[in-house]
Structures are given as structure tokens and as C-alpha cells.
Amino acid sequence: MALRKSTLKQYRDKRDFAQSAEPDGTEAVAASGKRRFVVQKHAATTLHYDFRLEVDGVFRSWAVAKGPSLNPADKRLAIEVEDHPLAYGDFEGTIAEGQYGAGTVQIWDRGYWSPQETGDPAAALRKGELKFTLDGTKLRGDWVLVRMERSAQGGKRPGWLLIKHRDAHAAAEGDAILAEDRSAASGRKMEMIAAGRGRNPKPFMRAKPADAPDAPATKPPRKRSPT
Ligand code: MN
């Protein structure tokens, strides 16, 4: 499995793990027969939703300012951000003031995803279009991520569009789902997480899935640049 170490370095370089409770990427993560995804609701400087798909041992990640919409007519801007370690899928809590991404993080949704087309999803992402199916607690059915033309992009980071396909899980009231402010991992609302109240999130990345009872835990090699 090709681990995109170079981009996990970006993740680590942005953070000080002595100050932030976020995983540093050396945590053991259970192998899974299925690809996992997580959507984290993140009340940072501005509220956004971090959309993460497991690809080749890391979470490929996009920041979706308006959140995913169930209406196929909505094209939601998804800014590609640095890859995150798989252990991040279990992170729910607060990032301390002064740290990168300071604010509250809720595991808004999680589950499994699968590519709709045969072939390497990493190659599909390189080409700029990935059609996939989500099997989460809130998000389900068919979706596409399509990279915008460079000319249409204002910022430095690649802009993509996250679009729901027409199927039984589509809805005209595309944003209604965003009103569901309950963690898929702990049942907590944002304000409870911010206050440090309620139960801890139930692990997903570290839990062995029922369909892979003997899967060995994998731990990526520790690679941290000296600071
Ligand atoms: Mn974020």
C-alpha cells in the first residue's frame, strides 16, 4: 500500500502535538476490508465540514464551507487540503486556542465508501473526477467530486465540487441534513463537545470491523521533521 508520506508531513508541520490533542499519525489504526470516510463539522474561524475519504492509507481531505447538500442541483465548493492520518477519523473535541484550526470538531458522519468505477481511486483523483457511493449514518448514495478548471480557481489550493447524484438518497431540501447537529460517534451536539461534556466518541478507526476480525493493526512509520 502506497502511503502518501510526503503529504502527512504537511499535516504534521502545521501542528504542534504538544499543544493539540489531535493525532500525530503514529497511532495504531485497524485495517479494514472496506474504505472508510468521515465528515467532521469544524467550528474554526468559520464553520465548515471536513470531508475525508480513505485512500491508500491516509484520509484525502476537502474543506466544504457550506457542507454537503443532498440536492443534486447544488455544487458545493470543496477545497482540497492536506492529507490527514487515518487516526484523525476518531478525533472529536477541541483544538486549543492559538493552534492550527483552533475550535470544536465533531464527527458529524462516518461510515464506508466505495468507488463506482473499477480502477485506482487515486488515479481517478489525479484525473480530477471520482464517482463514489457513501454508506454513512447521515450521507448515503451516489456522489461525485470533480476538480474545477484552474482558471475557475481563485486560491492556491485546488478547488473541487462535491455533488450529490440523483438517487433515492437525494432530497430537494439539500441542507436539511445539516441541521442534524449530533455526533455520529458520541451523539453529542457541538456545544456539548465545546464544553467537554457527554460521552467520548466510540472509536471507529481503531475498532476492528466485524467483517475483518483478524485484520492486523497497521501503524505507519514515525516520520517527523525536526523542529
Ligand atoms: Mn477543518
Image (cartoon, rainbow, N blue to C red):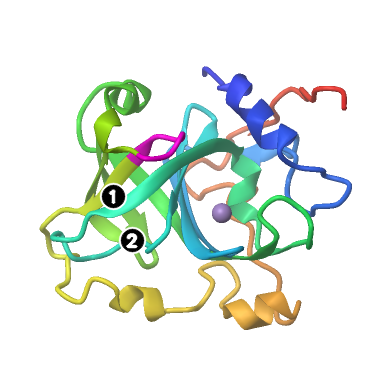
Instruction: Give the CA separation, mark 2 to mark 1.
Output: 7 Å
> Percent x, y for residue 65?
42, 59
For image coordinates 89% across by 47% down, the residue present is 18
Q: Residue at x 42, y 79 (%)?
A: 180
Residue behind mark 2? 68
Q: Residue furthest left?
A: 166
Helix, strand or loop: magenta stretch: loop
Structural crowding at the residue carrying mark 2, measured as other residues with C-alpha within 10 Å and reported as few (<14), some (14–19) or many (≥20): many
Q: Nearer the viewer, residue 200 or 41?
A: 41
Q: Position of residue 94 (x, y in %)?
A: 72, 65
Kindly tell me whether mark 2's CB lies below 8 Å from ligand 1: no
Cβ–Cβ under 8 Å for marks 2 and 1: yes
Magenta-colored stretch includes residue 155:
yes
Q: Which residues are magenta?
A: 154-159
Residue 129 visible in the current orientation: no
Query: Can you see residue 89?
Result: yes
Q: Nearer the viewer, residue 90 or 79?
A: 79
* Residue type, label 2: Pro
SS of the residue at dot 2?
A: loop
Picture quadrant of ligand 1: bottom right
Measured as percent of width and height from the top left, residue 71 is found at 18, 65
Horizontal side of residue 184 vs 143, given as left or right: right
Q: Where 9 falls versus 22 (above or below)? A: above
Instruction: Identify the residue under disc 1.
Output: 162
Q: Position of residue 184 (x, y in %)?
A: 51, 68
Type of the residue with mark 1: Leu
